[in-house]
Image: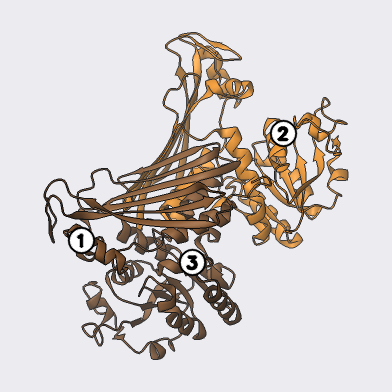
Chain colours: A brown, B orange
Amino acid sequence: MRKEIRVIQYGVGSIGAEIARLLLQKREVRLVGAVDNDPDKIGWDLGRVAGVGRDLGVIISDDATQVLKTQADVVIHCTSSCLPDVEKQLMECVDAGHSVISTCEELVYPFRKHPHLSNNLDSEATKRKVAILGVGINPGFLMDKLVLTLASACQRVNAVEVTRIVDAGCRRLPLQKKIGAGLSLNEFSALVASGQIKHHGLPESVAMIADSLELRVEDIRETIRPVIARTLFQTSFLEVQPGQVAGICQTACGIASGEKVIQLTLQMYVGAENSVDEIRLQGVPALHCRIPGGVHGDVATAAVVVNCIPPLLEARPGLRITRDIPMRYFPTDSQ
Amino acid sequence: MRKEIRVIQYGVGSIGAEIARLLLQKREVRLVGAVDNDPDKIGWDLGRVAGVGRDLGVIISDDATQVLKTQADVVIHCTSSCLPDVEKQLMECVDAGHSVISTCEELVYPFRKHPHLSNNLDSEATKRKVAILGVGINPGFLMDKLVLTLASACQRVNAVEVTRIVDAGCRRLPLQKKIGAGLSLNEFSALVASGQIKHHGLPESVAMIADSLELRVEDIRETIRPVIARTLFQTSFLEVQPGQVAGICQTACGIASGEKVIQLTLQMYVGAENSVDEIRLQGVPALHCRIPGGVHGDVATAAVVVNCIPPLLEARPGLRITRDIPMRYFPTDSQ
């Protein structure tokens, strides 16, 4: 009999709910608390809100301070993409003595964009003898951890190219909206300018690769442009007319001595036909790795978060990154 | 300035020599000793034997006991495939206070085939506060570590299939001989029966996957059959006539409740046209990963061995496995 792992779910949106459902399949895990600030969720049982089909005896509360007083091993934190927006939430978890796994994209590799904040989190976690980790499928795995794992089979790596193509037509409505599907070009441009259309995390993946391979990247550049629909697409939620925006093509590059040594490309649009995840390492040996069909973002993000629980609980205290965590599968109860 | 890592090279065959050449590219590494029992190598400088093009001031000796008295951080051990044959060598390294990375295939996951010996090595290494690791590209990476890393993106894994196809025509003569290229069917069968034709390590990969995914595998079955040449093949070293053996097709399966839940296939023969490494995970999500062209065995084995040095030196003392080591790239001096 292994030790029980007590988990608090902080944030019960679509990803948080998917994670909660997966956690219930793990025999060692016990859900002991839930936090969310959505008035439609507060006061309801986590099992009901997460679509488990039964009550768990865990009532969702917006009083994080109170919930975090519960004795627990790890908080699964799924609230927001930008680190400054969640700094206080993470600090409160750590100060309550809990390790944290967060889907906050900027936490996956925060050292370049937020050096001061990274340092604070690392110091505080080290002091409290807990570990913090930012992880998701992208960033956190496909464009960084998997790249670095493959690079362990190389004697030398000179350059890295990763392409992820996702058919957003099969995904949930918030994602289709997040990429601007169905907008006019002008509407799209306005939302990009105001920061409302953007996939977070590409520069974090570039930075993790660059620093880990010592590629001497001094500049990271991002671009976001629309993919325009050529024909009519109808998803379960919306319609995209020819000439309207179908989604995004977003890139982040790492530049070393004027040369592009890292190129990450994310195409996420309604109607994409060749979904794939593809990694190319230039080096000795050169390596080309393809995942035809690509990896489903939401399903796999829940998976990597939950699978990271056992290795994170064995990791050194402090702010950790996926590169240094031996990611593996956390076997499921009913197998 | 990082800490110097002092390395003893134990075994200077073709893989040992490739590793020594790679070690010289790492700024932190200093080669401080070399062991080999080949009379043609004893007394010669490691640099000359390994084809570095210059002397290193490290003379190859067959007196392991003496060489192991050298102060060092890690021994790179490349002598033999079967754990009982190298047990004493490994124990002597550990007793001298050195961590060890070995290419011994059975050390990659020794717990099922050699439980008693595994336990001895683990106890002794723990007592001496050093770590031991068996690693290579196969076993050690392509058919186990990479599989388990990909599985970290799965909510559930029910079955695993891995296929590696290698064109042995591009490889060195000992490998072409090891797979029986150019033999008659009778000669091949005799050498298989006497254990002289066999790739070591497939059952170890099956066992690592099975135990890590908790697939309840109670039986591991191996087969070796010849691949017969249909047309004439000429390598740099030998000729294979139609009807002669071109190489091997070797499989290992993991059986759970009568069902094949793990299937590993290694095809290594002269004239193979579709070199590839291919992983299929049945589960949620299902994942299919292809490395077209495959990964070059010798080049990548040297790479994974050297790249494992920094994480192994940070690992817990004892007998470790690649699953639990965060494998990544060890950056090279001149980059």
Which element is circle 2 on?
helix
From the image, tell me which residue sits under label 2: B17
From the image, tell me which residue sits under label 3: A310
Q: Does residue A154 appear left or right of residue A174 in this picture?
A: right
Residue B300 in which image quadrant: top right
Q: Are marks 2 and 1 on the same chain?
A: no
Query: How dense is the environment of label 2, judged by Cα within 10 Å: few (below 14), some, or many (20 and up)?
Result: many
Give above or below for A193 relative to B292: below
User: Marks 3 and 2, how far apart in space?
Assistant: 38 Å
User: Marks 1 and 3, how far apart in space?
Assistant: 47 Å
Q: Amino acid at mark 1?
A: Asn
Give the mark nearest the N terminus, 1 or 3: 1
* Residues marked 3 and 2 touching at CB (< 8 Å): no
Q: Does residue B43 appear left or right of residue B77 in this picture?
A: right
**Residue B129: x, y in percent?**
73, 61
Which element is circle 1 on?
helix
**Disc 3 chain ID:** A
Query: How dense is the environment of label 3, judged by Cα within 10 Å: few (below 14), some, or many (20 and up)?
Result: some
Q: Nearer the viewer, residue B11 or B297?
A: B297
From the image, tell me which residue sits under label 1: A186
